[in-house]
Amino acid sequence: GTSVPDLLSSVIVARMGEGDMAVSSSIGSNIFDITVGLPIPWLLFYIVNKGEKSITIRTEGMTQSIVVLLFMLICVVTIIHMSGWKMTKSLGASMFILYLIYLAQAIIYTKSPC
């Protein structure tokens, strides 16, 4: 629910010439979401149910997802390095293409039977 406000604040800050601040804001908000936003609902569920109920988490495809994300991370760092660590339109286009590739493989994997 906070992606659009994060996007808008990053765009505003980037237009003010503070590209580093825009990137760090988007990374920081994701770290906050993972370290605070995800654990709180699980903790509340545990407290409400007094630890009597458990949730089964399916892990099919976890290895593939981790490998794909690591590959994407390597690609992103390589592309940023090749662009001289500067935010450019070609860098943005490259990131967008990588995102589309990730989405395509995720859709294809979830549609195929396990």
Image (cartoon, helix red, strand yellow):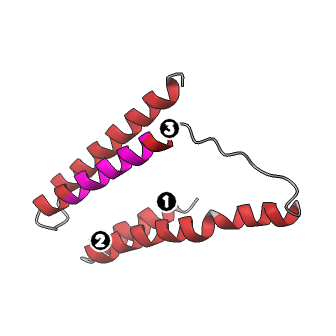
Q: For marks 2 and 1, give the CA distance.
A: 15 Å
Report the amino acid beneath label 2. Answer: Ala
**Other-residue count near label 1 (Cα within 10 Å), few / some / many at <14 / 14–19 / ≥20:** few
Q: Which residue is mark 3?
A: 61
Task: Report, in whole angstroms, how far the alpha carbon at label 3 lies from the one at label 2.
Answer: 36 Å
* Tag shown at residue 108: none
Quadrant, the N terminus: bottom right
* Image location of residue 74, percent across then percent down: 25, 54
The image quarter in which residue 68 lies: top left
Prevailing secondary structure class for the magenta stretch in the rendered image: helix
Are the residues tagged 1 and 3 within 8 Å (C-beta)?
no
- Residue 23, given in percent of the width and then of the height, sits at 33, 69
Whether residue 64 is situated above or below residue 26 in the rendered picture: above
The answer for how far apart the CA atoms under marks 1 and 3 are is 29 Å
Which amino acid, mark 3? Gly
Name which residue type carries label 1: Val
Secondary structure beneath label 3: loop
Estimate the x, y position of residue 61 in percent, counting from the top left.
50, 38
| Residue nearest the observer in this picture, 104 or 55 | 55
Circle 1: element type: helix
Look at the picture and state if 34 lies above or below 55. Answer: below
Residue behind mark 1: 4
Left or right placement of residue 87 versus residue 99 in this view? left
Number of numbered labels in the structure image: 3
Quadrant (top left/top right/bottom left/bottom right) for the C terminus: top right
Q: Residue at x 61, y 71 (%)?
A: 36
73 drawn magenta:
yes
The residue segment tinted magenta is: 64-77
